[in-house]
Image (spheres, rainbow, N blue to C red):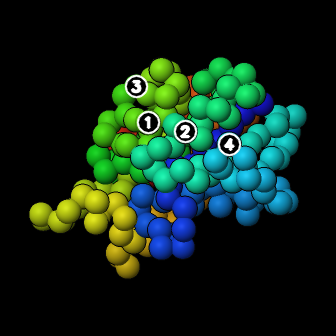
Amino acid sequence: MKIVVGLGNPGAEYSGTRHNVGYDVIRELIRRWQPGRSQMKYSSEIWEIVLGSEKVLLVCPLTYMNRSGDAVQPLIRFYQLPTAEVVVICDDMNLPAGRLRWRANGSAGGQKGLSDIIQKLGTEDIPRLRMGIGRPPGRMDVTAFVLGKFRPDEKDLAEIAVQTAADSVEMWVRSGITSVMNQFNRSADSPE
């Protein structure tokens, strides 16, 4: 069994914002996999699918970003899964818009939802897919930037990133973290 957690904030006012790219990837996977109705439990909206022979839960925590661990911890505890079987998808201001970076573990790197999950689980050993959203321009407030929508000139790039992220999640489910890191973590100067 695998769990795919897309981080974001619930509510229509946050839809399409930089901070909600994790939710966007879950929505794309739902579109592809057609899981049927969701369930509300563990402070999350959860869809269940079977991909090949693997049961997969698609999870959107409803706790707001900064309290994501309140949703993820009881879910992992209930299913008694090792954290290696869970991936967290989140935004990352330290990556250029559209860039993806998979990691098997590590610090939260300033991402507050991921930080809360790490703190609640008591380990940094949780796979994550970081999706680049770029840095705020000039002296723009960071909160306003992450809670803002992509600029018109970034929309195509953001949509391609969501599609590519969904492709990478499918590969992670089938082939694991090493394969997906080798395939999707490209350096800035490598051809796309």
Residue depicted at 85% across the width and 43% down the height: 50
Type of the residue with mark 1: Asp
Whether label 3 touches label 4, CB < 8 Å: no
Q: Quadrant of residue 24?
A: bottom right
Residue 130 at what x, y percent from top left? 44, 44
Residue behind mark 4: 42
- Mark 4–mark 2 Cα distance, whole angstroms, equals 8 Å
Dot 3 or dot 4, earlier in sequence:
4
Dot 4 or dot 1, earlier in sequence:
4
Residue behind mark 3: 106
Whether label 4 touches label 2, CB < 8 Å: no
Residue behind mark 1: 116
- Badge 2 marks a residue whose secondary structure is helix
- Mark 1–mark 2 Cα distance, whole angstroms, equals 8 Å
Residue 70 badge: 2
Type of the residue with mark 3: Gly
Type of the residue with mark 4: Tyr
Q: Is residue 47 left or right of residue 98?
A: right
Residue depicted at 42% across the width and 58% down the height: 19
Dot 3 or dot 1, earlier in sequence:
3
- Mark 3–mark 2 Cα distance, whole angstroms, equals 20 Å
At label 1, counting other C-alpha atoms closer than 10 Å, the crowd grade (few under 14, some 14-19, many 20 or more) is many
